[in-house]
Image (spheres, helix red, strand yellow):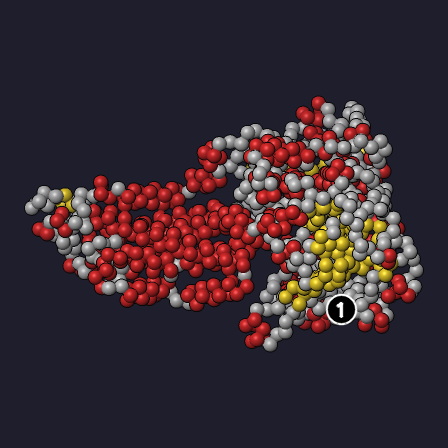
Amino acid sequence: MSRIQPIQTGSRQTGPSPTAESGEVLLEATDLARHFDVSRPWLNRVLERAEKLTLKAVDGVSFTIRRGETVALVGESGCGKSTVARLIVGLYGLTRGRLIFDGQDISDLARRSGRQSAAIRQRFQMIFQDPYASLNPLWRVGTIIGEPLRFFRPEMSGADRRRRVGELLEQVGMSPADALRYPHEFSGGQRQRISIARALANEPEFMVCDEPTSALDVSVQAQILNLMKDLQQQYGLTYLFISHDMAVVKHMADRIAVMYLGRIAEIAPADQLFATPHHPYSRMLLAAVPSLEGEGRERTMIEGEVPNPVHPPSGCAFHPRCPYAEARCRAEVPLMIARSDGSEVACHAVEEGRIGP
Amino acid sequence: MSSTPSSGEHNAAAVAGHEPGAAGQKPVLSVRQLRVEFPTRHATLVALDDISFDIAPGEVLGVVGESGAGKSMIGNAVIQLLEPPGHIAGGEVHLSGRRIDDLAEEDFVPLRGRHIGMIFQDPLTSLNPLFSIGDQLIETLRTHLPIGEKQARERALALLTEVGIPAPETRLDSYPHQFSGGMRQRVVIALALAAEPELIIADEPTTALDVSVQAQILALLKRVCAERGAAVMLVTHDMGVIAETADRVAVMYAGRLIEIGPVNEVIRHPQHPYTVGLMASIPGLAKRRERLYQIEGAMPRLAAIPTGCAFNPRCPHAAERCRTERPELLPVGGSRAACWLHDPENPLPRRDTLDTRQGEPALDSPGETAR
Amino acid sequence: MNQDVKTTDTVPVAPPPPSRLRTFLASDIVYSWQRQPVVIIATLVTLTMFAGALFAPWIAPQNPFDPRQLELIDAFTPPLTTSDFTGNFYLLGSDSQGRDVFSAILYGSRISLLVGFAAVLFALALGTALGLMAGFRGGWRDALIMRIADVQLTFPSILMALLIFGVIRGFLPRSMHAEVAIIVLIVAIGLSDWVQYARAVRGATMVEKGKEYVQAARVIGLPDHRILFQHILPNVMRPVLVIGTIGLALAIIAEATLSFLGVGMPATQPSLGTLIRVGQDYMFSGEWWILLFPGVALLLLALSVNLLGDWLRDVLNPKLR
């Protein structure tokens, strides 16, 4: 892979990240946007004189992911993090913006299916949140894991494919004999292992993981997170890791993007973000994480809730909950501004120096 | 338990003295050797096995465990809302000294809401979508308390103010769907508190909420219950929630209570090997570890609970005795744990194989996992 | 690094998967069946009537469709009587043509079941195809199909069948009416009945389409037809089969109703409905058996199939368990 990305500008250069400082850019997302039409049906709109409603689930998100690193998207429900994941793998089409994967423009991936896009699609995979819905209940585990193989490598013989499925099962800590069983015979953690095995089948380079452990118990979560880290080391995988759990993100990610209402509030190297969060929302999220220290620390109370994304606040979407909000925050959408410590922050108060480091 | 139903009251009070943290006060809820069974066509599954604990007035007892451990089952058994064919097959439940597990359904109905308030994970299941929240509050108040319409309305307003609903006089006529998730859960708390029950059972009250809202709701729940001296049973899978909210914590595994004690003791010095592993497997904000500690395997299904200690196949310390003899809750430190490691006469030797197995020399020793 | 990945969740201890027959016999369906006497009886009645219809030529004493076999002289023989004239034994009596009512019921239920099955299959195929398309593609196709379904639902299905029946017959020459009656019936009942399959399939398709296993197939880049037929269709068939069982009872009754109204099977090829229509003329003239026995047969057939359908729905519906 010798293709180098030309689009990398100076201001975009993020600071030292633990594993992938000089790694080449694998994925570049520029100004991604996805709007959903959430209006009532046409007839109702006419009769009720309702207006067209647009949900801007993602509205101008840019980031890069380097080969071998783990970038996390965190945020509360409705912030658009899962939509970003689905945009990247082509489950949704882009309303606006551009996606470059290893030098190839994949912005129109959602419209290309079948053989046309097989070459690019087999290089990335996705792991889903709900282990009970992510496996076809009528198929045997072996058929499920073998599905990408049957599609991408039709020349592979049945025996070879079965051997490969067995290997994959062993890789995720299960037995090759499990290939003959059905998904309902397995626990949530084991099903997530099966999902991972399916995702690994074609030796992808890049994995989009959408809340892969949110539906699991903590002890099982530890098993899955460890497995994911092991696989990353073994295969040099690149992860886009989506989660609402700050502690999990801290454990997994090299760099973290904090999202709020369809935009990125702050991107920073993981250690940097946890040591000195800049954006008031990042600070709030961190402060709200329950602490296992017990009575050592009172959780900082944050007023309000995430507003309805169909009617987002003007200017900076966070301003109604922000203690530092001023007139400018209510009027003007803040832009991402790179800081010397390697983070990028979209906040007027941070830019003007109204909030200390 | 050797007591007859008639001596139940006396007995419950007497046993409560053994509970650390509940000493001196008469418990609001006293559960003794509770056993819940689910007969199926293949076998009778024991969903709760020999559960005993007390909750004192004003105390928050956290009940924590993985899915299927039976943590929600305890609350459902206490309020007699077990899904058939599940039923209480043994033991006793006392509410403020009165035995309630043997009450018939019609005698139990007045207890729900009046003496036991309930808060569930999804606020929408507790609220009727067809009535305004004012109507629902007033109806609840008037069902349980001898007050008039006007008085009830005032009480409803006061309750909404107390749970932090802004402009309550305008919100009284709103319907559940007009509230956000966090606000709905506040309304549910107001409903649960309306009749001033002695006991609140909160089953995963914040699981459906975002972290920022979660903190608000937990603080609210803790404050209003403390002010009223209501006992709270907080059922959750989230150790963080327990750490922030509970006074004591009960850890469930495979339908059994395996450790119970003050929350700081259990979190900082877990004693049961399962709790030790559980605490170590939680990724923390404070410290970054390359690998998380993982408990091998999975919790057994109810149909296949091993003999002896239910945790023995996954336990690094397990010995022959663990496979044959089930340990009682044994006092250790400030808490009690069901593990032969803590047998006062004949403690099981520890086998510290945890660290080498992880391929990492200095994984936290059990006492420090939470730092 | 890899060896500690090899965690083993101990939940399934791995015995070889049992054979399909043994899995079936140990399943909840068989268990539930054994515990419900009503369902057992319904099954036996259904199977008996299916067998009777299927093997009618070998069981029935005469072929009621063959005029040469009818003994006019034996007309109106009461049940359980041996004819004084021909020596024939009439188990359930005979009608005005000297037709053996028992044989007529066997042959009639043969036609009723044939029409019922064929109409259900027709409705099921049409409804499933349209429902899949509406649910999977959405947009204007969905709007169009579902609005047609809505409009059709505002008419009672028997009225719909009458209408369709009339229209089709209008296009055919009169001489062909008797020959194609059975096909016209099937199409009419099928067309009046597709809506519920389409609705069920559309709903289930939309649910399945949103599930992550379908999204996983999309991420791989599988073409739509593969996703539709390999993933979604098999997973939406369960509710369809349940509706189909109950629909069979309804289709049998619909056929009987049409034939009773005189627009279905002709008297020369009587179905159960035709037999009831013929029989009602004699209800008050003392020959009660001509009406009663076909009526009871229709009732038993429809009721037991319906009971089976209800039971299947309960067993297969995960929400009720």
Count the numbered circles shown: 1
- Identify the residue shown where x is 64% and y is 30%: B306
Residue type marked 1? Pro
* Quarter of the figure with residue A203: top right
Q: Position of residue A130 (x, y in %)?
A: 64, 48
* Quarter of the figure with residue A283: bottom right
Residue C59 is left or right of residue A231, and the answer is left
Q: Chain of mark 1?
A: A
- Identify the residue shown where x is 59% and y is 50%: A114
From this viewpoint, is residue A172 visible? Answer: yes
Q: Residue furthest front?
A: A2
Give above or below for B125 relative to B92: below
Quadrant in which the N terminus of chain C is drawn: top right
- Identify the residue shown where x is 61% and y is 66%: B131
Q: Position of residue B232 (x, y in %)?
A: 73, 50
Local SS, label 1: loop
Residue A81 is left or right of residue A159, and the answer is right
The one nearer the camera, B322 or B36, is B322
Task: Assess disc 1: are there few (<14), some (14-19) or many (≥20) residues with their C-alpha within 10 Å of its C-alpha.
Answer: some
Q: Position of residue C278 (x, y in %)?
A: 20, 58
The one nearer the camera, C45 or C114, is C114
From this viewpoint, is residue B68 visible? Answer: no
Q: Position of residue A150 (x, y in %)?
A: 58, 41
- Identify the residue shown where x is 50% and y is 57%: C133
The one nearer the camera, C130 or C284, is C130
Q: On the image, numbered disc 1 is attached to which residue?
A: A313
